[in-house]
Image (tube, grey):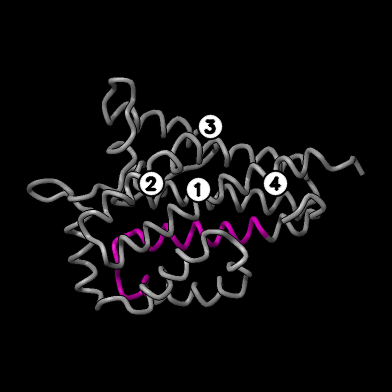
Amino acid sequence: MTEGAGAGDWGALAQLRQGLYRFFGGALLAPDEERLAALVAATDVLEEWDIDDYAFAPAWRLAVVALHEALPVDEMEGDYVRLFMAGAGGALVPPNESEYVASDGGSAATIVAKLDGDYAALGYSVKPGLAYASDHVAIELEAMATLCHREAHAWDGDDPGGAVAVVRQEWTFLDHHLARWLPPFASRLRAVASPGLYPTLVDATSAFVLHDVELITMITKARLTQPAP
């Protein structure tokens, strides 16, 4: 994207980003046959975009290969439970923000309460009935997918001011949450389970999120430096 890009370009980019956030969020939920099939199908749809133009493309390619070569679902379930779900000794690598972010001496509950407040400020509601804490990586990724959907709608509705306002919300959410804790989460997972499907997926998720912070910054600057119509 360049400074001369139009709203249609930014709207399409927001749709791609929405798809990627939703893909990575789904990939980091507990596996089942239906979800795995949907994820593999989603890679084909996302491949229609020029992902190779972006810096996270190598990590994305590894994730796509890993998904297409995934173990039988029952073995994936075993890995997921062993790595991410609490057992007698707790999860090996908890997929939750509160495990990685300090709160100035506060508890995990304090971190989750702050996150829940941020969700409320964004008008985002965690779907009822999900067996995941609100600071689970998949829930936070879905929050970003929701914001990207709103951004795309604003661009497509010829509301650039509204779109940029959503972009700023995206930047703040990433800066306060996912961009802070995904790198240490990926590093810990890589240390105990690499090579493997889930380290590959989390590495790709982290690479995408860090790239998105830079991309969002560029979009905001590009919009602010364009002359008024």
Label 4: state its secondary structure.
helix
Question: Looking at the image, which residue sits at the far right?
Answer: 229
Residue 121's tag is: 3
Residue 1: percent from the left, percent from the top? 72, 56
Q: Nearer the viewer, mark 3 or mark 4?
A: 4
Residue 117: percent from the left, percent from the top? 45, 30
Q: Nearer the viewer, mark 2 or mark 3?
A: 2
Q: Residues within 10 Å of mark 2 (few under 14, many from 20)?
A: some
- Residue hosting label 1: 210
For badge 2, the amino acid type reads Pro
* Mark 2–mark 3 distance (CA, rounded to whole Å): 25 Å
Front-most of residues 169 and 212:
212
**Left or right: 149 as drawn, with respect to 115:** right
* Mark 3–mark 4 distance (CA, rounded to whole Å): 23 Å
Label 1: state its secondary structure.
helix
Q: Earlier in the sequence, mark 2 or mark 4?
A: 2
- Residue hosting label 4: 219
Q: Earlier in the sequence, mark 1 or mark 3?
A: 3
Q: Earlier in the sequence, mark 2 or mark 3?
A: 3
Q: Are marks 2 and 1 in contact (CB under 8 Å)?
A: yes
Quick check: is 27 in the magenta stretch?
yes
Q: Give the residue displayed 52% in from the left and 77% down from the top.
A: 44
Q: Are marks 1 and 3 in contact (CB under 8 Å)?
A: no
**Left or right: 181 as drawn, with respect to 209:** left
Quick check: is 96 in the magenta stretch?
no
- Residue hosting label 2: 183
Question: Looking at the image, which residue sits at the far top?
Answer: 105
